[in-house]
Image (cartoon, helix red, strand yellow):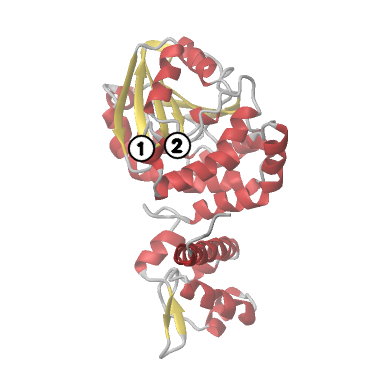
């Protein structure tokens, strides 16, 4: 019988306490966002639980526990002399300011979906079947949009598109663009606002997301240049697009090679396929880090089951790496595959025939 090293057990338990605390705090972040507490504290003015209750109409006794818990997590700041709580400017950027370059609340909504839908994934583990994107809880769709939008706001217009040869000039002059797997349309709308001479089409097989994207386009004043339609990656209308983009979705597809073939047929002669995927190295050992921990977890609960619910079910996973992604593009008939740029969270590939 193996004998455990109790010092190592104690060290592991110590890490687990931190992990459980993070999981609990995540639920409290989603709660605070849901009832408007972070936005109510966004001005940075210190408040007692009673003062915040008057400001938000939330019962004081609940607020006292919520404030204390998030102060213990260092997500809020507590002043024992005044018995008041506040958001520092940094905390406000992360939790209260939707358009900030560090807004993070959507990530906790993604995690909420993983907990909520765990029984479905457990059943998939037992049966070998998949779980479609559309079968998940609604918090996944909203959380995905809010989480990834932060990265797109930071990098899409400033870095990613300029890294693609000749693409930015075409968009400024007037191009036809398709955004495949557009979800709630954050990436599509961002591009439409940056390049008013171009026309954009967003496609997603999930109709509720398309409906939300249409509403968002109206809210952002770009509905005249953006069309959102329900369609899969293998069936979206061909139309000789100058740019076809896929943001963090190729690895979710059951048949990414088939999708790539349809992209090739739908591009103009000198068109570009932009693939944005979660950052990953080719070797597992190189992905065993905090970012890989998040991505492998999301891949287990969301991405791999989504792919396995579809025809072919290639199940690339969210940590596919460049070599596997390159093979998809080459198998689809493309000859040019180039990593144009990257961030700690994403890889951006330029693909051409």
Residue 283 position in % (x across, y down): 38, 33
Q: Quadrant of the C terminus?
A: top left
Secondary structure at numbered mark 2: helix
Among the 4 quarters of the image, the one containing residue 319: top left
Left or right: where does residue 272 sit relative to residue 308? left
The answer to whether the residue labelled 1 contacts the one labelled 2, judged by CB atoms less than 8 Å apart, is: yes
The residue positioned 45% from the left and 19% from the top of the image is 328
Q: Is residue 80 left or right of residue 229?
A: left
Look at mark 1 in the image and give the residue it sits on. Answer: 156
Would residue 297 appear left or right of 327 to someone viewing this image? right
Question: Quick check: can you spot residue 218?
Answer: no
Q: Position of residue 147 (x, y in %)?
A: 48, 48
Above or below 175: residue 2 = below
Residue at the far bottom: name it. Answer: 81
Task: Please identify the residue farthest to the front as the structure is shown.
Answer: 1
What residue did someone put label 2 on? 187
Callout 1: few (<14), some (14-19), or many (20+) C-alpha neighbours within 10 Å? some
Please tell me whether residue 107 is drawn above or below residue 178 in the rendered image: below
Q: Say whether residue 299 is left or right of residue 283.
A: right
Q: Residue at x 57, y 74 (%)?
A: 66
**Pointer 2: residues within 10 angstroms few (<14), some, or many (20+)?**
many
């Amino acid at each position: 019988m193996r004998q455990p090293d109790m010092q190592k057990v104690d060290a592991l338990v110590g890490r687990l306490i931190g992990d459980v605390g993070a999981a609990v705090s995540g639920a409290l972040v989603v709660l605070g966002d849901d009832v408007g507490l972070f936005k109510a504290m966004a001005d940075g003015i210190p408040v007692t639980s009673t003062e915040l209750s008057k400001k938000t109409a939330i019962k004081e006794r609940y607020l006292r526990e919520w404030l204390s818990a998030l102060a213990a997590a260092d997500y809020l700041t507590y002043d024992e002399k005044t018995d008041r709580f506040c958001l520092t400017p940094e905390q406000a950027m992360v939790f209260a300011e939707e358009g900030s370059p560090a807004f993070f609340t959507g990530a906790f909504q993604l995690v909420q979906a993983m907990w909520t839908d765990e029984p479905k994934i457990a059943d998939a583990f037992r049966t070998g079947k998949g779980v479609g994107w559309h079968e998940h809880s609604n918090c996944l769709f909203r959380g995905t949009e809010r989480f990834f939008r932060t990265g797109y706001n930071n990098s899409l217009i400033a870095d990613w598109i300029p890294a693609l040869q000749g693409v930015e000039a075409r968009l400024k002059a007037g191009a036809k663009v398709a955004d495949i797997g557009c979800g709630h349309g954050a990436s599509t709308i961002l591009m439409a606002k940056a390049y008013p001479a171009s026309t954009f089409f967003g496609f997603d097989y999930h109709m509720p997301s398309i409906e939300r994207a249409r509403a968002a386009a109206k809210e952002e004043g770009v509905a005249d240049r953006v069309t959102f339609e329900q369609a899969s990656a293998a069936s979206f209308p061909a139309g000789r697009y100058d740019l076809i983009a896929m943001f963090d979705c190729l690895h979710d597809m059951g048949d990414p090679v088939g999708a790539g073939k349809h992209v090739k047929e739908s591009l103009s002669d000198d068109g570009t396929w932009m693939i944005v995927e979660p950052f990953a190295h080719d070797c597992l050992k190189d992905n065993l880090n905090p970012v890989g921990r998040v991505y492998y977890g999301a891949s287990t609960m969301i991405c791999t089951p989504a792919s396995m619910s579809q025809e072919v079910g290639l199940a690339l996973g969210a940590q596919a790496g460049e070599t596997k992604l390159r093979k998809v593009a080459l198998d689809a008939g493309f000859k040019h595959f180039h990593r144009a740029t990257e961030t700690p969270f994403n890889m951006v590939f330029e693909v051409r025939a």
